[in-house]
């Protein structure tokens, strides 16, 4: 799937238990069409201690992936959840822009 969301973009969750929350994209999982968003969709994993790796056991809290269709880009100029489009500027470079306010994203 061709995604218009990139790492370090600010996104809003559109569906699920964290609906309406805003966070930064930590990682794109292209094969799963998912993203990891900072502070969103937290899960608990019970880990066993591993003395060979100097790893302590216990409950670890981490982010789980969210499907890319359940997040929307948040524009920095109009501060709204929006779609992102592409256009070619005068220099011949392809740039991303906010479809609500027509401001450049990059």
Image (cartoon, rainbow, N blue to C red):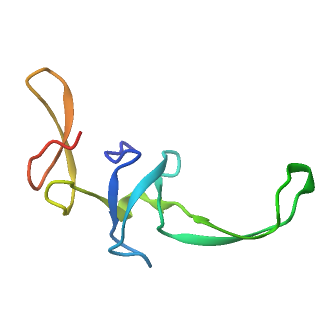
For residue 39, side relative to residue 77 (left or right)? right
Residue pushed farthest bottom?
A: 17
Residue pushed farthest right?
A: 52
When the figure is inspected, residue 83 is found, relative to residue 4, above or below; the finding is below
Residue 34, position in %: x, y?
Answer: 47, 55
Residue 29, position in %: x, y?
Answer: 51, 48
For residue 27, side relative to residue 10 (left or right)? right
At x 33% / y 70%, what residue is drawn? 14
Asked where in the image residue 3 lies, by quadrant, the reply is: top left
When the figure is inspected, residue 12 is found, relative to residue 73, above or below; the finding is below
When the figure is inspected, residue 10 is found, relative to residue 22, above or below; the finding is above
When the figure is inspected, residue 31 is found, relative to residue 93, above or below; the finding is below
Asked where in the image residue 49 lies, by quadrant, the reply is: bottom right
At x 19% / y 24%, what residue is drawn? 93
For residue 64, side relative to residue 83 (left or right)? right
At x 85% / y 66%, what residue is drawn? 48
Residue in the foreground of this view, choosing between 52 and 44: 52
Asked where in the image residue 62 lies, by quadrant, the reply is: bottom right
Total numbered badges shown on the rendered structure: 0
Quarter holding the N terminus is top left
Quarter holding the C terminus is top left
At x 19% / y 61%, what residue is drawn? 79
Residue 98, position in %: x, y?
Answer: 16, 49
For residue 67, side relative to residue 58 (left or right)? left
Residue 87, position in %: x, y?
Answer: 14, 35
Residue pushed farthest top?
A: 91
């Amino acid at each position: 799937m061709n995604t218009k969301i990139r790492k370090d973009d600010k996104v809003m969750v559109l569906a699920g238990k964290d609906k309406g929350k805003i966070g930064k994209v930590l990682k794109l999982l292209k094969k799963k069409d998912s993203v990891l968003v900072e502070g969103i969709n937290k899960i608990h994993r019970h880990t066993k201690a591993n003395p060979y790796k100097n790893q302590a056991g216990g409950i670890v809290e981490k982010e789980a992936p969210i499907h890319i269709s359940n997040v929307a880009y948040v524009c920095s100029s109009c501060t709204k959840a929006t779609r992102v489009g592409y256009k070619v500027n005068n220099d011949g470079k392809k740039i991303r822009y906010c479809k609500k306010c027509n401001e450049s994203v990059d």
